[in-house]
Amino acid sequence: MKSDIHPQYRQVVFQDTSSGEAWITRSTIETEETITWEDGQEYPLAKVPISSTSHPFFTGTMTIVDTAGRVERFEKRYGKRKRQTDAAEE
């Protein structure tokens, strides 16, 4: 096997930016940020906008994850949408 051609496989902390939940696992992802974990060691940090702790399929609740103002642009273009609870009351 050739040396120095494979990505580094190491411990990485993934953090859900919606819920704040964080977990540590092994990955080859490249990151710019680091975080000090509960064990006192510093690990690379990978931020994810949605995970099983905040996804509607797993939580049973509807949340809108807005990255870079997409929701505002949609609402400006097409008007505000009715929430499911508002539509059920009518």
Image: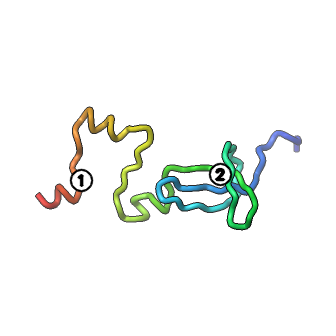
Q: Give the image location of residue 84, x and y in percent.
A: 23, 56
Residue at (70%, 57%) from the top-left corner?
26
Q: Is residue 15 left or right of residue 83?
A: right
Residue at (58%, 50%) from the top-left corner?
47
Dot 1 corresponds to which residue?
Answer: 83
**Quarter-of-image position of residue 67:** top left
Q: Is residue 79 left or right of residue 60?
A: left
Q: Residues within 10 Å of mark 2 (few under 14, many from 20)?
A: many
Q: Give the image location of residue 7, x and y in percent.
A: 77, 44
Q: Give the image location of residue 33, x and y in percent.
A: 66, 46
Residue at mark 2 to residue at mark 1: CA–CA distance: 34 Å
User: Closer to the camera: disc 2 or disc 1?
Assistant: 2
Q: Is residue 63 left or right of residue 13?
A: left
Q: Is residue 81 above or below residue 23?
A: above
Residue at (41%, 65%) from the top-left corner?
59
Dot 2 corresponds to which residue?
Answer: 45
**Quarter-of-image position of residue 61:** bottom left
Q: Is residue 57 above or below residue 72?
A: below
Mark 2 residue type: Leu
Q: Are marks 2 and 1 in contact (CB under 8 Å)?
A: no
- Total label count? 2
**Who is closer to the viewer here, 5 or 44?**
44
Residue at (24%, 35%) from the top-left corner?
78
Mark 1 residue type: Arg
Q: Secondary structure at mark 1?
A: loop
